[in-house]
Image (spheres, helix red, strand yellow):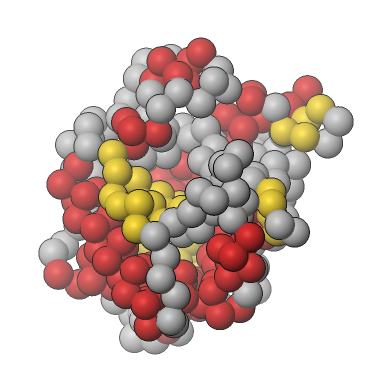
């Protein structure tokens, strides 16, 4: 399930060293008056030969925002489990990896009014995604993948889908990344013996109206991927990106696979191979335009 997603420009400032081989990036932005939750936006050094490239991995939801829930699993837990596996794979491949969160928390510090009865509000989700994009932009990442899981009222809805934005100045790179992630994710599923319905690669303009806020519906795109819009998405993300939804947690079979170590490894492997191919074939420097 896709959260409202928005970007902002954040200034890169010296990092704070944390555990060995990693550091917490210090993200400063006027759009984040309370800052980030301590211990979020963490960069990990490569464990393999350094490629001098950075990949941003954003596990969706967390903390007061569980995301989609069904069949005994929560989206927030699944996205993090996949992201942590993917992080280890990419580090071994020689990449610097930045994770928006490494625990069960929001990324932005939320005001009391943004969490009501333990649940995040639309305003809270908005500011939290501002923090996620600020993290990726601060890291000057070469590529981004946002990990989510799907849900629907009908439990028979199933399959994997990948979203990209076709309105950016680097939309061709977005589409190439989305296609590579799609192809490698499907290949990873098949190697694991699973036939996962292929919902394809879709423009984020196909996500439709969420009904969450009038501003989000007027924008009509996934903000983490999409172009600028004054007053709503003033400072969009600055790197090619794709948003993946590998399974529906409301489908009993897919929820079981998504909650398993084997299923999470298969997802992470598909994402790893897609990102490897994307960054190995054609240089993809971060965009210099906010288009």
Residue pictured at 39% horizontal, 60% vertical: 197
Residue pictured at 40% horizontal, 71% vertical: 195
Reply above or below: 129 against 26.
above
Reply above or below: 83 against 170.
below
Position of the C terminus, as image quadrant, is top left
Residue 255, horizontal then vertical, whole percent: 62, 62
| Residue 107 or residue 32, whichever sits in front | 107
Residue pictured at 81% horizontal, 27% vertical: 116
| Left or right: where 176 falls relative to 220 | left
Answer with the quarter of the image where residue 17 lies. bottom right
Residue pictured at 32% horizontal, 25% vertical: 228
Residue 200, horizontal then vertical, whole percent: 30, 52
| Left or right: where 241 falls relative to 101 | left
The reply to whether residue 169 is visible in this rendering is: yes
Give the farthest residue toward the bottom.
48
The reply to whether residue 142 is visible in this rendering is: no
Residue 67, horizontal then vertical, whole percent: 64, 44
Residue 261, horizontal then vertical, whole percent: 61, 78
Reply above or below: 175 against 121.
below
| Residue 116 or residue 70, whichever sits in front | 70
Position of the N terminus, as image quadrant, is top right
| Left or right: where 53 falls relative to 259 | left
| Residue 122 or residue 42, whichever sits in front | 122
Give the farthest residue toward the right.
117
How many numbered callouts?
A: 0
């Amino acid at each position: 399930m896709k959260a409202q997603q928005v970007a902002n420009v954040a200034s890169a400032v010296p990092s704070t060293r944390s555990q060995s081989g990693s550091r917490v990036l210090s993200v400063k932005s006027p759009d984040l008056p309370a800052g980030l939750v301590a211990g979020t936006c963490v960069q990990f050094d490569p464990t393999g030969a350094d490629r001098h490239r950075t990949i941003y991995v954003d596990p969706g939801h967390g903390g007061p925002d569980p995301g989609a829930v069904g069949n005994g699993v929560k989206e927030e837990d699944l996205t993090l489990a996949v992201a942590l596996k993917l992080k280890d794979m990419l580090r071994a491949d020689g990449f610097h990896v930045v994770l928006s969160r490494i625990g069960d928390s929001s990324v932005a510090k939320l005001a009391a009014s943004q969490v009501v009865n333990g649940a995040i509000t639309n305003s809270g989700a908005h500011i939290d995604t501002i923090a996620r994009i600020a993290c990726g932009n601060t890291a000057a990442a070469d590529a981004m993948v946002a990990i989510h899981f799907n849900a629907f009222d009908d439990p028979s809805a199933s399959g994997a889908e990948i979203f990209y934005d076709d309105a950016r100045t680097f939309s061709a790179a977005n589409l190439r990344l989305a296609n590579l992630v799609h192809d490698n994710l499907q290949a990873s599923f098949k190697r694991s013996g699973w036939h996962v319905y292929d919902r394809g690669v879709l423009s984020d303009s196909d996500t439709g109206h969420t009904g969450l806020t009038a501003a989000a519906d007027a924008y009509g795109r996934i903000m983490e991927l999409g172009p600028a819009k004054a007053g709503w998405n003033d400072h969009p993300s600055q790197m090619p990106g794709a948003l993946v939804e590998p399974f529906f947690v409301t489908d009993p079979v897919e929820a079981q696979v998504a909650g398993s170590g084997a299923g999470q490894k298969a997802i992470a492997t598909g994402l790893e191979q897609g990102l490897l191919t994307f960054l190995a074939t054609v240089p993809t420097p971060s965009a210099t335009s906010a288009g």
